[in-house]
Amino acid sequence: MDKLNHLKITILCENVVGNLAVVGEHGFAVYIETDSGSYLFDTGSGISILHNARVLKKDLRAVKKIFLSHGHYDHTGGLVHILDVANPINVYGHPEIFEEKFAISKEDLKTEKRFIGIPHRKPLLETKGANFIFNTDFQEIENGIYLTGEIPRSTEFEKGDRRLYAKKGDIFERDIIPDDQALIFSTKKGIVVLLGCAHAGIINSLWHIVRKMKKETFYAVIGGTHLGFVEEEQLNYTIDIIKQIDIQIIGVSHCTGLTVAHRLFKEVGDRFSYASVGRSFEI
């Protein structure tokens, strides 16, 4: 198995800023620098990525490939802006990223439906230079860089976010986000995992990676965990298992939420890190 000699991960878009010159947003994007070049994992909602990349001196024109963790607006909305400066370019994702995705909430006998899918349609993005490459299986993209493909839902307690639906014709069906993927790096220090939102469940995601990579330890797990939106039982089980897994750096972000992030810090101590905008992890 090839291992990367150098890996630098810089948070471009996130809800919290760690640098007064950058801008926060509800979204997630990561700039990745490796031996073989630069890559982008997710693109945020589109509000801050160009500005933050400029402030943090990350050249979007140098990006070789873009990876989309799933088809929600807060991870894909910036793609149209990236294509203005980096095109043509291969964009990797699951074939269901363009599904019509909604958040549905009920309050005071009222039902609110909010579209949360990719805000720009595939033909438009293709005319701007996106070459979509779809995958459902685990695969090596470059030496030492892997996409998980679809992540099996093997745990009983990771039930996902009950507000999320996909529109199939005229029917709204519960969306378990089959398009959810993680990005994996094999480095000299160990396995590094980038999560978009971990809609499949962070434990499901890590167990899937263990099976595919045949490694039971992780150097770093960084990104959104969606634990800020799950029920208490799922949160408790998840934290108990995370405490038992050999992970040296737990760098949470985005949909983890500050309340859950604070609890994780108390539970895992020095292994915890918050991945705010401008934060870099160099391996």
Image (cartoon, helix red, strand yellow):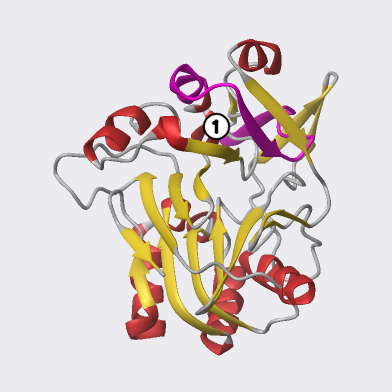
Residue 155 appears in view: no
Q: On the image, numbered disc 1 is attached to which residue?
A: 76
What residue do we see at 62% from left, 17% from top?
Answer: 125
The location of residue 22, given as percent across then percent down, is 22, 39
Q: Is residue 251 left or right of residue 211?
A: left
Identify which amino acid the numbered label 1 is placed on: Thr
Instruction: Residue 27: name its quadrant.
Output: top left
Magenta segment includes 103: yes
Residue 177 appears in view: yes
Measured from the top left, where is residue 113 in percent x and y?
61, 25
Left or right, 156 with reference to 231? right
Position of 51 relative to 186 (above/below): above
Magenta region, residue range? 80-106
User: Which residue does the image show at 79% across and 63% down from the upper left?
Assistant: 153
Image vertical order of residue 84 relative to residue 253, above or below: above
In the rendered view, does 269 fall on the left or right side of 35? Answer: left
**Residue 249 within the magenta-colored segment of the rendering:** no
Q: Quadrant of the C terminus?
A: bottom left
Which percent across, then down, holds residue 130? 63, 23
Q: Report the residue at 77% width, 47% height from top.
A: 178
**Residue at disc 1, secondary structure:** helix
Q: Quadrant of residue 70?
A: top right
Q: Residue furthest left?
A: 20
Residue 251 vertical position relative to residue 107 in the rendered view, above or below: below
Report the front residue among 237 and 276.
276
Q: Which residue is more in the foreground, 278 or 127?
A: 127
Q: Is residue 48 left or right of residue 246?
A: left
Quadrant for the N terminus, please.
Answer: bottom right
Query: 70 or 79: nearer the eye?
Result: 79
User: How far across and down, in percent of the image, does residue 115 sit?
Assistant: 60, 24
Q: Quadrant of residue 67?
A: top right
Image height of 50 relative to 278, above or below: above
